[in-house]
Image: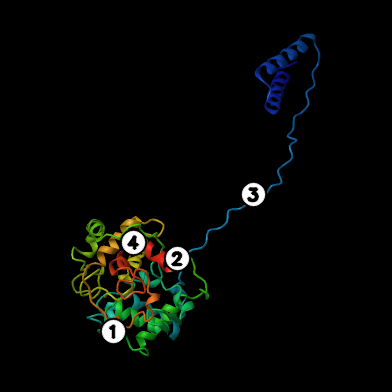
């Protein structure tokens, strides 16, 4: 055999060894046979090896797409019409409430100086930022807190009277109509009984202990004080009617009738959004830190609201509603700070 034939033989043998898994001894034996044939002058014709395996007919299962995150419609999609202008004005009022309706407001002076978007981030459009995605599709609806059916106007009124510790614009005012139009527009495309990913706030597990304001105070000093101040007074630049960072307690913060005064609501809110830079998928607080921080902030002094007409059916109060009376025998302190599991179990009976 010439050199090319020898190379073909060796290559052939190596392929055979790979296909049938021959041992090293078997390969050496076969090489000996080839050398014998070469010495005796016998010509060797080798078959051409081809891959005769049957291609797999199994189709790869494509990965299932993750549920898409809810997104608010784009402002750029608004037409240059009176309706579009109304929605744009509504957004301006939500984003810069203090500028128009705060203590130094250019339109009215009816609110505490906070902006609606201090609680409803990015003007109510941020996923898991207490957004407005579900308002248009769920209102009007019955709310146990008031014991009545409420529309969007009543919901905005509640925010002014509680979170903004003030008075709401008149229901037929330009400002109220604009805010309602904007909030409904944000929920465009969300249908009844749908809850898209990113709606509302993230869920976090209950603690097996009471949330601790003592532990929360240390967390606040470490992670929150730089923006919101050592006395929770927030940060405002000179000559600007709006807070850069809102007050978390004190006279200019939300009152004790606001939704954020519930420890669970505050904990869920900060878990996905605070400190600055946190997101739902990259939080900067552990669950325990969120609970303890909520306990601390909501243990601090703030304005009072007459809530004597809230929850006419006391059995409908949330487990962490901070004020009695209750339909169970648990204390006000346990309802406010937990642990909540015993309350949950009692309500199942």
Q: Nearer the viewer, residue 347 or 43?
A: 347
- Please report the residue visible at 28 percent of the width from the left and 61 percent of the height from the top: 293
Q: Secondary structure at mark 4?
A: loop
Q: Nearer the viewer, residue 160 or 85?
A: 160
Q: How is the image coloured?
A: rainbow
To which residue does mark 4 refer? 339
N-term-proximal mark, 4 vs 2: 2
The mark lying in front, picked from 4 and 2, is: 4
161 lies above or below 205: below
Using the rendered view, name the quadrant where residue 241 is placed: bottom left
N-term-proximal mark, 3 vs 1: 3
Q: Position of residue 324 (x, y in %)?
A: 30, 75
To which residue does mark 1 refer? 167
N-term-proximal mark, 4 vs 1: 1
Q: Position of residue 97 (x, y in %)?
A: 30, 78
To which residue does mark 3 refer? 60
Q: Give the number of the disc on residue 198.
A: 2
Counting other residues with Cα less than 10 Å from the Cα at mark 1, is it few (<14), some (14-19), or many (20 or more)?
some
Q: Nearer the viewer, residue 79 or 279?
A: 279
N-term-proximal mark, 2 vs 3: 3
Q: Position of residue 268 (x, y in %)?
A: 36, 64
Asked whether the viewer can see residue 190, the reply is yes
């Amino acid at each position: 055999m010439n050199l090319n034939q020898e190379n073909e033989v060796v290559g052939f043998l190596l392929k055979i060894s790979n296909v049938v898994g021959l041992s090293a001894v078997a390969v050496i034996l076969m090489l000996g046979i080839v050398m014998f044939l070469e010495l005796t002058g016998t010509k060797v014709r080798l078959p051409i090896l081809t891959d005769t395996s049957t291609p797999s007919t199994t189709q790869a299962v494509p990965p299932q797409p993750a549920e898409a995150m809810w997104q608010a419609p784009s402002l750029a999609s608004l037409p240059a019409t009176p309706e579009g202008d109304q929605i744009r004005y509504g957004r301006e009022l939500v984003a810069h409430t203090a500028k128009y309706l705060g203590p130094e407001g250019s339109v009215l002076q009816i609110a505490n100086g906070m902006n609606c978007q201090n609680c409803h981030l990015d003007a109510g459009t941020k996923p898991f930022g207490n957004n407005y995605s579900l308002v248009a599709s769920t209102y009007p609806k019955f709310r146990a807190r008031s014991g009545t059916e409420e529309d969007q106007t009543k919901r905005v009124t509640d925010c002014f009277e509680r979170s903004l510790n003030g008075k709401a614009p008149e229901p037929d005012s330009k400002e109220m109509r604009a805010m309602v139009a904007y909030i409904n527009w944000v929920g465009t495309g969300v249908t009844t009984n749908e809850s898209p990913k990113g709606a509302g706030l993230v869920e976090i597990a209950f603690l097996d202990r009471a949330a601790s304001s003592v532990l929360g105070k240390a967390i606040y000093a470490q992670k929150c004080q730089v923006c919101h101040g050592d006395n929770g007074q927030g940060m405002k630049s000179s000559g600007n009617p709006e807070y850069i960072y809102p007050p978390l307690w004190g006279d200019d913060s939300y009152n004790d009738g606001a939704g954020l005064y519930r420890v669970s609501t505050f904990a869920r809110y900060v878990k996905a959004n605070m400190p600055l830079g946190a997101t739902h998928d990259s939080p900067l607080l552990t669950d325990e830190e969120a609970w303890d921080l909520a306990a601390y902030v909501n243990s601090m002094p703030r304005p009072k609201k007459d809530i004597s007409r809230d929850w006419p059916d006391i059995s409908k109060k949330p487990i962490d509603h901070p004020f009695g009376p209750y339909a169970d025998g648990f204390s006000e302190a346990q309802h406010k700070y937990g642990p909540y599991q015993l309350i949950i179990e009692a309500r199942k009976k």
